[in-house]
Image (cartoon, rainbow, N blue to C red):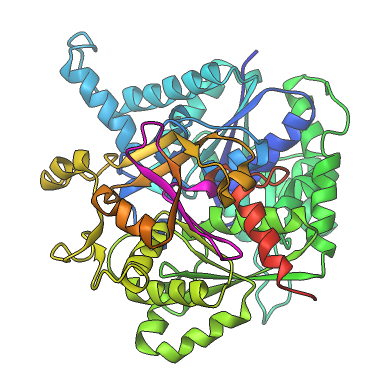
Amino acid sequence: MAKFIFIAGGVMSGVGKGTAVASIAKLLQARGFRVTAMKIDPYINVDAGTMNPIEHGEVFVTDDGDETDQDIGNYERFMDTSILSTNYMTTGRVYQTVIERERNLEYGGRCVEVVPHIPEEVIRRIRRAAKEARAEITIIEIGGTVGEYQNILFLEAARMMKLKKPHDVLFGIVSYLPIPSKIGEMKTKPTQNAVRELNSAGIQPDFILCRAEVPVDAPRRRKIAIFCSVDPRDVISAPDVDTIYEVPLNLEREHLGARILSKFGLRTRAGNGLRDWGKLVTIARTASREVKIGIVGKYFASGEFVLTDAYISVLEALRHAAWNFERKPVLTWVNAEEFEQDPGALRRLGEYDGIVVPGGFGGRGVEGKIAAIRFAREHKIPYLGLCYGMQLATIEFARHVAKLKDANTTEVNPETPHPVIHIMPEQESVVRAKKYGGTMRLGAYPCIVAPGSMARKAYGKRLISERHRHRYEVNNDYRERLAAAGLTISGTSPDGKLVEMVELKNHPFFVGTQFHPEFKSRPLRPHPLFREFVRVSMAGRKG
């Protein structure tokens, strides 16, 4: 059995297609089915690795080293599973494969055309992902919104699959219903127009997820059903919620899972698989005792708007850990550049129970981050440094404790007298050739955790596996000097050549990781390092 559900978007982007896909996957998984989820990005980019995080959001890295859209992270968190590169495709990736196949004469001399060969490659990738995941139901998110020329070929692939096996394919659209403030009434016309755009691609939706500030009422539900040619039961109310983890429960109350199985002619196999999920949501709603975490970074702003998607996995990992202790996470963005302009602003960091410096690239805001790290070290505020946050912690320690004046990373200052962070040897030729796409150290690698370290206490085991995305590393020429000054190397590659974790003794919690532990955190299974960081952060707060 192989069933497929395509999810498209209407009216505008950012209304929650990825969350909808993840939530539907959770509903079907809770009913006993093997489910996987896929993301189709309409960009010509081969992967998400070269996209600006302010514009596109976080680059999520899979175990097998693919740089993907942040929605893959949501799929993993909701389904509590690892998703591989086969579940992610872009326009660039699809065209690249078709062109390579044509160059290898694999089309037997035929003219290679946009239709049908591009949609056929899309279908091949979808079926391969379903097969490799051994999935009974595969849910495919089509990026963008209907009516855009960028995703029309993906809609065509979906239409072709439906044409061939009509009982095995369903379509859903996630559309926004605005409530203009001067009118005060929820408007359905934009959604009606979005569905007509989908109809023009030869697709009739089987259900419509109605995103809005408030639940959809009966009159609006009837109007959408009539004008969009769907059963009123398939007009699904999807109002705003405080946390995305409420969405599966809301969709369950709308009977979406049961409706999907009914359309596929399937029966529920399991009982209430959402019981633990419901307990988590209750904690998220009701927790009142706070833990305040400051996140010092730079990928926050777009004009007058603050964007959180650049660090979405970090935020979710902190929430998972806080909810594990029935605490309310209060997460505050702190712009590192403020500390460069006004060093006195560092005093604000004393308001937080813990400080996180996440990953990043380039020199902007680096000195502000280093100043924040020094403040956390000297004032004994629990600190967690992720990737760049670990490298900058090493630089801060080298400058102010090991007395290596002007120590730096060669990424920022190639002429530094003390390159305590330098480019990985195998990356030098790649950068010289300007081959940036998909060439970093990517994916899951093993790490040996030192006995007696904070990290060992958190993980509770010697050998771990974590995901990476970086070109630079701790310079081994400085390891002995840094260790002699008090920097603990608490994690290394199995051969001991690469520093994976550093930490400080005589500090409540000060850990830096070269890898990205946030990628492996789950709502019901918080990542060990985030859990320990939050636990120690809580200890300093009496409220």
Identify the image quadrant of residue 349: bottom right
Q: Is residue 488 above or below residue 380?
A: above
Q: Is residue 12 left or right of residue 413?
A: right
Residue for point 13% across, 41% down: 429
**Image quarter of the C terminus:** bottom right
Residue for point 37% across, 64% down: 392
For the record, the magenta segment spans: 493-518
> 9 and 290: which one is in front?
290
Residue 531 appears at what percent x and percent y?
A: 66, 53
Residue 299 appears at what percent x and percent y?
A: 42, 67
Identify the image quadrant of residue 330: bottom right
Can I make out residue 196 in this image?
A: no
Q: How many marks?
A: 0
Q: Is residue 218 left or right of residue 151?
A: right
Residue for point 58% across, 46% down: 452
Identify the image quadrant of residue 363: bottom left
The answer to if 514 sits in the magenta stretch is yes
Residue 220 appears at what percent x and percent y?
A: 77, 58
**Image quarter of the N terminus:** top right
Q: Is residue 50 above or below residue 381?
A: above
Q: Is residue 79 above or below residue 484?
A: above
Can I make out residue 429 in this image?
A: yes
